[in-house]
Image (spheres, rainbow, N blue to C red):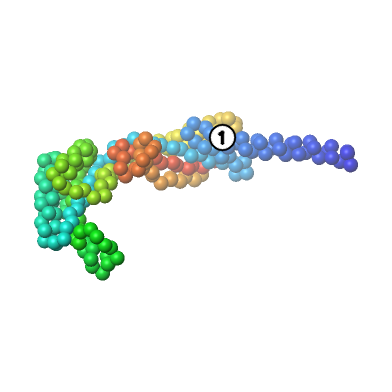
Amino acid sequence: MMTSDNRLIPAAVIGGLLAVGLIGAGALIGQGVVNARAGDRSVTVRGLAEKDVKADLAVLPIRFTASGEVLSEVQARIDGDLAIVRQFLKAQGYPDSSVDLGQLGVADTRSREYASQTGGPRFILTQTVIVRTNDVDRVQTTTRNLNDLVRQGVVLQDFQGPSYIFTRLNDVRPAMIAEATAAARTGAVQFAKDSGAPLGPIKSAGQGSFEILPRDGFGDEATSLNKKVRVVTTISYRLK
């Protein structure tokens, strides 16, 4: 029994060393994560490309509300607030073409839909004005100046801030794909050099989806003026 067990120990040790060697074969080289498969003599690498960009379109919804017992009076207040908002935006430098009027919302708290509610005003009206512009810096200034509307008696509702959008992805796409592909090849070349097997032609390639993220890595991408565009390509090369 002892002789049989002693013969098994070296085999187990050798098996463990082989397992460690296989795990070590997945190496981080440059910007590419490399997997080698000896069976078909190929190496698969990933190349990363990132680019900081600035949003080129801003959408700023301004929603305000008025309430009271007499519908005509509440409507008159909403109309007056609308005039104040339009004048405010004109003073901020927006042309009429950048300002759209949203749908007017009317709620009767004593209607059947709201029958369970008690107290408070009967009529609640809400109006939204939407600013859409490529002048994203101006929108930032406008957001900081919204207190001027509050001082004039406009009751803002559910203000979430502007949304910033990057619309020129197609402009940066070719260069970023080329950068990611070059990063992947750099990893493959290094792996081939270390393994002593010359790098062959591309066997297969795949481009991951483009991601647009907040530049600083936190917060909501939609509310971030500065963003980061990221793409990862996956390429398999033959080894000669």
Residue at 10% across / 52% down in the picture? 80
Residue at 53% across / 41% down in the picture? 44
How many labels sit on residues? 1
Residue at 56% across / 34% down in the picture? 27
Question: Where is residue 180 drawn, in percent x and y?
Answer: 42, 37
Q: Is residue 169 left or right of residue 147?
A: right
Question: Where is residue 211 drawn, in percent x and y?
Answer: 38, 44
Question: Where is residue 236 drawn, in percent x and y?
Answer: 51, 42
Q: Is residue 137 left or right of residue 178?
A: left
Whether residue 76 is visible: yes
Q: Nearer the viewer, residue 170 or 211?
A: 211
Q: Quadrant of residue 135?
A: top left
Question: Where is residue 214 drawn, in percent x and y?
Answer: 35, 39
Residue at 46% across / 38% down in the picture? 47
Whether residue 168 is visible: no
Q: Is residue 70 left or right of residue 201?
A: left
Q: Quadrant of residue 2?
A: top right
- How many residues crowd mark 1 within 10 Å: few (<14), some (14–19), many (20+)? some
The C terminus: image quadrant? top right
Q: Is residue 142 left or right of residue 52?
A: left
Question: Tag 1's secondary structure?
Answer: strand
The N terminus: image quadrant? top right
Q: Quadrant of residue 105?
A: bottom left
Residue at mark 1: 27
Q: Nearer the viewer, residue 158 or 138?
A: 158
Q: Amino acid at mark 1?
A: Ala
